[in-house]
Image (cartoon, rainbow, N blue to C red):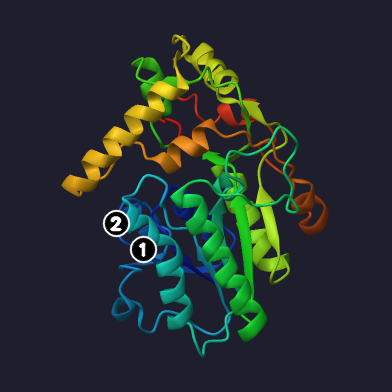
Amino acid sequence: MPSGLIIGITGFTGSALARRLAAAGWDVRGIDEHEDAAPELDELGVAIELADVGDPDELEDLGRDGDHVFYVMRSVSDTEDDMERRTIRGVMNVVEALHGTEIASFTYGSTMAVYGSGSRDTLTEESPSAPNTLLGRLNLETEQYLQEQHEAEGLPARIVRAGTVYGPGGGTLESLRGGNLRLIGGGKHPTSRIHVEDAAAILEAVALRGRSGELYLAVDDHPAPAGEYLGYLAAQVGARSPRSSPKFLVQGLVKLHEGFTRVTRTRASISSSLFGLVTGSYPTSNEKVRRELGVELRYPTYVEGAATLLTPEEDEG
């Protein structure tokens, strides 16, 4: 029976991964800073401990021989310090805590932010990185650190850069119905998404069948602009499509808001890093995970994925 250790286990992606692995008979445990999905996972026999990845003292006795380790901490909308703590600093602390443990794999969940503003052309694992936000720079620094650990110490590290992860549970439909969403600059740039269940499937495949030192992209088959995606969801629930706000205006407000939150040491509702992801152009190929890992997506486009969102009891993330 495989054993999985999930860092960030109660988050959106982490809890979906835990459910998938538990259903497949894995021995699953993990750590996180919040108890968001803890009661639900506890019913599945998943062991959860609260711990701060930024504090090495809280990571003692973390790993076991044979563990497949998944690092999927949330970081996009954090403060600058939290963003660093949950990316490079946290990964370094976890790797140090695992020193001397013969783990089977270490899979790091990165983002499209490493591509900066993106490209009009299709992005692949070979496309150059050009981060232009703090998150992008931290993601890339973390990826490079893991690559160095792989080459120097034999760490079985793999990188998964995921598109926008969506699925039941995040509140987008509620925001659509309430008219609280805005498209930035018309939402015209293509971006790649991945349903949270397919993201979990790709993470599992990378851990079991991926190659150490390799990068894999987790996206579906159909890059689509935010305006198209949100317009489709709005039509399904009888809501009005989101209105558009000028990009330069939103960018200015983001900078002002970040300055205020930096002084008050509070969390920004939208950061420059999130703004960069929302406005970037990320048409991305999943050919490598299909060809090399044999992954078949359950939700190849947002149309199939939307069906999981449109129930009275559930909402979308």
In the image, residue 150 sits, relative to residue 183, either above or below, namely below
* On-image quarter of the C terminus: top left
Residue shown at the point (52%, 21%) measured from the top left: 230
Residue shown at the point (41%, 75%) measured from the top left: 93
Furthest-bottom residue in this view: 100
Residue shown at the point (77%, 58%) measured from the top left: 293
> Helix, strand or loop at disc 1?
helix
Q: Position of residue 33 (x, y in %)?
A: 30, 61
Q: Position of residue 186 (x, y in %)?
A: 53, 17
* Left or right, residue 257 beside residue 227: left
* Left or right, residue 179 beside residue 163: left
In this figure, which residue is indicated by the disc labeled 1? Answer: 85
In the image, residue 169 sits, relative to residue 25, either above or below, namely above
Residue 144: image quadrant is bottom right
Comparing 75 with 294, the one in front is 75
Q: Position of residue 235 (x, y in %)?
A: 53, 11
Q: Position of residue 11 (x, y in %)?
A: 40, 52
Q: Residue 34 has which mark? A: 2
Comparing 77 with 263, the one in front is 263
Residue 299: image quadrant is top right
Q: Amino acid at mark 2?
A: His
Q: Amino acid at mark 1?
A: Arg
In the image, residue 62 sits, relative to residue 220, either above or below, namely below
Disc 1 packing (10 Å; few <14; some 14–19; many ≥20): many
> Helix, strand or loop at disc 2?
loop
Report if residue 99 is visible in the image.
yes
